[in-house]
Image (tube, grey):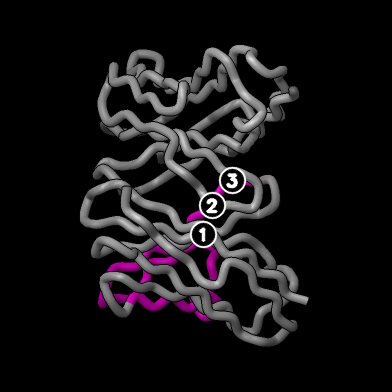
């Protein structure tokens, strides 16, 4: 079955540091890939997504590129802020798109001032 | 993006009572709704998938008689935790999708069973 693996952390960085959270997946067919963010005590918010190979999703300074050859969707940000402290989930869905969601274990990020 | 709400956001109940959690899609018709459970510092675990007007499909290991799901309309699904016990305490998150479009997640409901 489909699965998602991501570094579990916790990851602790200083403000303005470079962030990478690795995510790799196993899936049949061509899934869509997502990064969700969860702030303390809240639900999930979609951060970015990519629906086909070589697509780059980006939002709020975060980026991730759908790499079919390495089955990866690593999350990056050039300069993190304290407000980025949260748990980040890599996920895939489908096919069909929007169905059969599988989440990674989540990576807790703490950014120190 | 589409908005999904959950009510209540927090609920505390006594052991043995039942609790109902509502999930609503506010600005679109959700043909499918999903219910997830999240344990502290863990990822989301899919509990069940419900399509409007039909019985929910439960994931392996989820007790359908304990977690009753009703998807009576295209904008509302409910999860009822029956005879709740302390081990049912958790964060419950719903999501909604229209056809094969992406899922939109609700803000979650924190259930504490005393």
> Could one spot residue B38 in this view of the protein?
yes
| Marks 1/3 same chain | yes
Q: Residue at x 48, y 20 (%)?
A: A74
Q: Using residue B16 as the reference point, say whether residue B69 is left or right of it.
A: left
Q: Residue furthest bottom?
A: B17
Mark 1 vs mark 3, CA separation in Å:
11 Å
Question: Which quadrant does the C terminus of chain B fall into?
Answer: bottom right
Name which residue lies at 37% across and 52% down.
Answer: B104
Residue B93 has which mark? 1
Q: Is residue B36 visible?
A: no
Looking at the rendered structure, whether the residues under marks 3 and 2 are on a common chain is answered as no
Q: Residues within 10 Å of mark 3 (few under 14, many from 20)?
A: some
Query: Which of the pair B66/A48 is nearer the observer?
Result: A48
Q: Residues within 10 Å of mark 1 (few under 14, many from 20)?
A: many
Taking B107 as reference, is A20 above or below it? above
User: Pointer 2: what residue?
Assistant: A43
- In the displayed structure, A39 sits above or below B62; it is above
Q: How many numbered discs, if any?
A: 3
Q: Position of residue B19 (x, y in %)?
A: 59, 81
């Amino acid at each position: 079955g489909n699965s998602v693996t991501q570094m579990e952390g916790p990851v602790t960085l200083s403000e303005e540091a470079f962030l990478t959270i690795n995510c790799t997946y196993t899936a049949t067919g061509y899934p869509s890939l997502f990064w969700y963010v969860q702030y303390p005590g809240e639900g999930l918010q979609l951060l970015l997504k990519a629906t086909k190979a070589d697509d780059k999703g980006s939002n709020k300074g975060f980026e991730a590129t759908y790499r079919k050859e390495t089955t990866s969707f690593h999350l990056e940000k050039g300069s993190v802020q304290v407000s980025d402290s949260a748990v980040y989930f890599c996920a895939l869905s489908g096919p069909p798109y929007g169905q059969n969601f599988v989440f990674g274990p989540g990576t807790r990020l703490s950014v120190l001032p | 993006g589409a908005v999904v709400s959950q009510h209540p956001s927090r609920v505390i109940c006594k052991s043995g009572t039942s609790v109902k959690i509502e999930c609503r899609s506010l600005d679109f018709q959700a043909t499918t709704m999903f219910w997830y459970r999240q344990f502290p510092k863990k990822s989301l675990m899919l509990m069940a998938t419900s399509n409007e007007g039909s019985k929910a499909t439960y994931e392996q290991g989820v007790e359908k008689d304990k977690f009753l799901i009703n998807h009576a309309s295209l904008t509302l699904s409910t999860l009822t935790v029956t005879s709740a016990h302390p081990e049912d305490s958790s964060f419950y998150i719903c999501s909604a999708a229209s056809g094969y479009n992406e899922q939109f997640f609700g803000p979650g409901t924190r259930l504490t069973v005393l």
